[in-house]
Image (cartoon, helix red, strand yellow):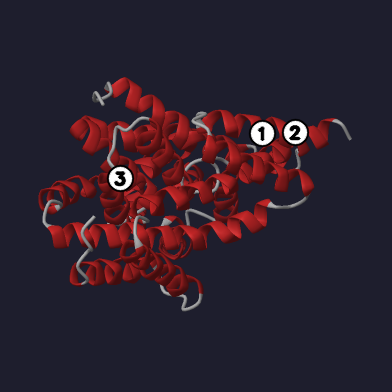
Amino acid sequence: MAAPKLRELTGIFLKIGNTTFGGGIPTIAALQRELVDRRGWLSPEDYGLAFALARITPGTNVIAFCAAVGSRIKGVPGAFAGALSETVPSAALAVLFTVSYESWRVDPLVMGAVAGIIAAVAGMMWTSVWSLVKPFMGGAAHALRCLVFTGGAFLAIWRLGLTPLPIIALAAAAGFLWREPAK
Amino acid sequence: MNLVILYLLLLKAVTTSFSGMSSLPVVRQDLVETHRVLTDRELSTAIAAGRIGPGPNGLYVVSVGYFVAGWPGAVAGLLALITPAFLIIPLMKWGARYAGVPRIRAAIHAVILASAGLLISASIPLTRDAAAGPLTIGIIAASFTVLMFTKVESWWVMIGAAIVGLAPVLFR
């Protein structure tokens, strides 16, 4: 697929970054759908690399993720486009919310629309889980890896209360040592 | 407060954290307790304002900047928020260079699979919070179905969900 123009890439970041409620992970999930699944501008490998490295970059993960994805598609200008268009409009909105917080919070229309969007985001998250795992599902040996890494990471954070950083580090180390079966 | 100092203090808070809200203790320590340019009430309003809108969780830092120094302060907060993100550019270059090595690739694949597990754990509370009644449960199911089985742009699903969310308020 042909590389997109910087303007097109910025357009995607503006749309996704500033309409997805619920914080960083839903935004990353929505960008995955637009950039990897729908447009093919980014390979699943590059997506995975950006996701993992964003986790170990200091600061807010999703901004680093946008910079990484932008740099992979369009170099340093792409990184700036990603980080700025992900943050500037929603930051301006956050300041406006700050100014008028007390009156917004009791407006049922605003809260109704926000509740609808949050519900749509929740549905989207599960499609994102599936498209992360799907490329690795062929054959029993691959399915076992999926079960161990995805299930293990889930239990580690959900049951053992580990933070994402050591989980990602452990998965990387185990993945390095445990050879992947041939496709 | 001097804008450069505000920027550096917020940058310190953002750089020493690895997720949106974990910079909070440092921000509170520096701006509320040490420098006394922010009140706890303003801090919690900033957090709430950052949460009800779209965008990353760490955005409250921008609102904090606004409380301390108006719009220029908000810009200082925004710059502090995005500065550390650019560290990832050299990291990506380094990662891409070694991505062809089978063991490194296997490690990256393992990280992708693990990140799906982390995503599940983030999705459960989000889904639980979002499912407030029959209407929102319907939106969750509809959003999942449309996004899973069609190529419709996600943005239209969000707009549609906002409109459906307005319905019970309008037609009460």
Residue identifier under label 1: B162
Helix or strand or loop: what does disc 1 sit on?
helix
Name which residue type carries label 2. Answer: Leu
Residue situated furthest right in the rendering: B172
Depth check, mark 3 against mark 2: the one in front is 3
| Of A8 and B12, the residue lying toward us | A8
Can you say whether B32 is above or below A101 in the image?
Answer: below
Q: Which residue is mark 2?
A: B166
Mark 2, residues whose alpha carbon is within 10 Å: few (<14), some, or many (≥20)? some
**Above or below for B73 versus B87:** above
Task: Using the rendered image of the protein, determine whether residue A79 is visible from the camera's viewpoint.
Answer: no
In depth, the one of A110 and A176 nearer the eye is A176
| Residue A44 badge | 3
For the residues beneath circles 2 and 1, the answer to whether they share a chain is yes
Local crowd size for mark 3, using a 10 Å CA cut-off: few (<14), some (14–19), many (≥20):
some
CB under 8 Å between discs 2 and 1: yes
Image location (x, y in percent) of residue B26: 40, 63
Q: What residue sits 19% from the left and 34% below the top?
A: A76
Between tags 3 and 1, which lies in front?
A: 3
Q: CA distance from mark 2 to mark 1?
A: 6 Å
Q: Residue furthest front?
A: A139
